Image: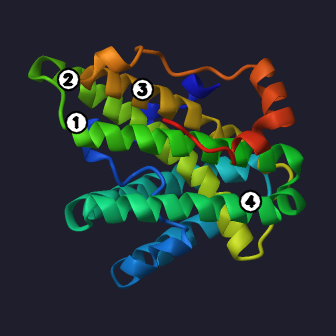
Amino acid sequence: MNEAIPLESYEIGTKGLNDLRGLVGFPSQRRSAGELYSSIERINSFIDRLLLRSITAKTKEEFISIRKEVFAPYVGVVTSLAQLVRIMVPPEVTERIVGEAFCELEADFQDEGLARFGPAAKDQAMFTIWTLRRTSRLISKISSLGAPSPELKDEDEKVASDFRFYATWTQFHLDCMLVAIRNNKSIQLEVLPEVIEGLRAAVNAYGLAKRGLNLRSPEDNVQIQPYQWDEEDQDLLDSSMADMALEVLDD
């Protein structure tokens, strides 16, 4: 599924993974951004407009068309915010805000996800948040280690570029659901499966983060390829992912 997403058509290349600490989990639709609200209020307003436009789609085809138009500016804005955070916010503050943001996400979907989106979408969202938590911790480790050795620079930049796509692709679809919750909007039943598909890219982002960490600390990690979703995973998700999303992580 995820390999069919046309990465090259979005032109969102980046530098190394160590430059992307603020990307995963940092507030775009999160109330915990309050400490930085004066700086990002207009950014959040712009993101809101993009997301609200997307979830007004009546059909799958209309959603795909709108997404194609708004995804590039969405990526530009959230990536710029991540870079601003990396420069201006102390690492310990970033870690605390990211932790609070994930807790808020879990609470939002636990409280309203089932009634608003149904069990499959709610469970997929919870699994996605759980996966993004783990990914965020990997990126934090990568950031603390800095750039890999010079001979691995090109590979790291390619991994970072792919990671940026899958992370923001996941975040876009999660934010579509979250903006619907926060603004009491609905997502059409025909559109919702496309949103669920978008959430599954979180597993690819996690796999790429593991590869990036392996480039810096191979003794602690096994290099893996981005994971591909199958029917067995979906069965497991439907039966247990909501509980898994709430467990304490040891990454």
Secondary structure beneath label 1:
helix
Separation (CA) of disc 1 from disc 2: 17 Å
Residue under pointer 4: 109
Separation (CA) of disc 3 from disc 1: 13 Å
Q: Are marks 2 and 3 in contact (CB under 8 Å)?
A: no
Q: Is residue 96 visible?
A: yes
Spot occupied by residue 74 in the image (x, y as percentages of width and height): 46, 58
The label on residue 145 is 1
Separation (CA) of disc 3 from disc 4: 27 Å
Residue 227 position (above or below residue 146):
above
Say which label, 4 or 2, has the lower sequence index. 4
Foreground residue among 7 and 233: 233
Residue type beneath disc 3: Lys
Spot occupied by residue 228 in the image (x, y as percentages of width and height): 62, 20
Spot occupied by residue 44 in the image (x, y as percentages of width and height): 47, 74
Residue mark closest to the camera, 1 vs 4: 1
Separation (CA) of disc 2 from disc 3: 17 Å
The label on residue 216 is none
Residue mark closest to the camera, 1 vs 2: 1
Q: Residue at x 33, y 80 (%)?
A: 39
Residue 92 occupies quadrant: bottom left
Q: Are marks 3 and 4 in contact (CB under 8 Å)?
A: no
Q: Residue at x 50, y 58 (%)?
A: 99
Residue mark closest to the camera, 2 vs 3: 3
The label on residue 154 is 2
Residue 147 position (above or below residue 245):
above
Residue type beneath disc 2: Asp
Residue under pointer 3: 210
Q: Is residue 147 left or right of residue 104?
A: left
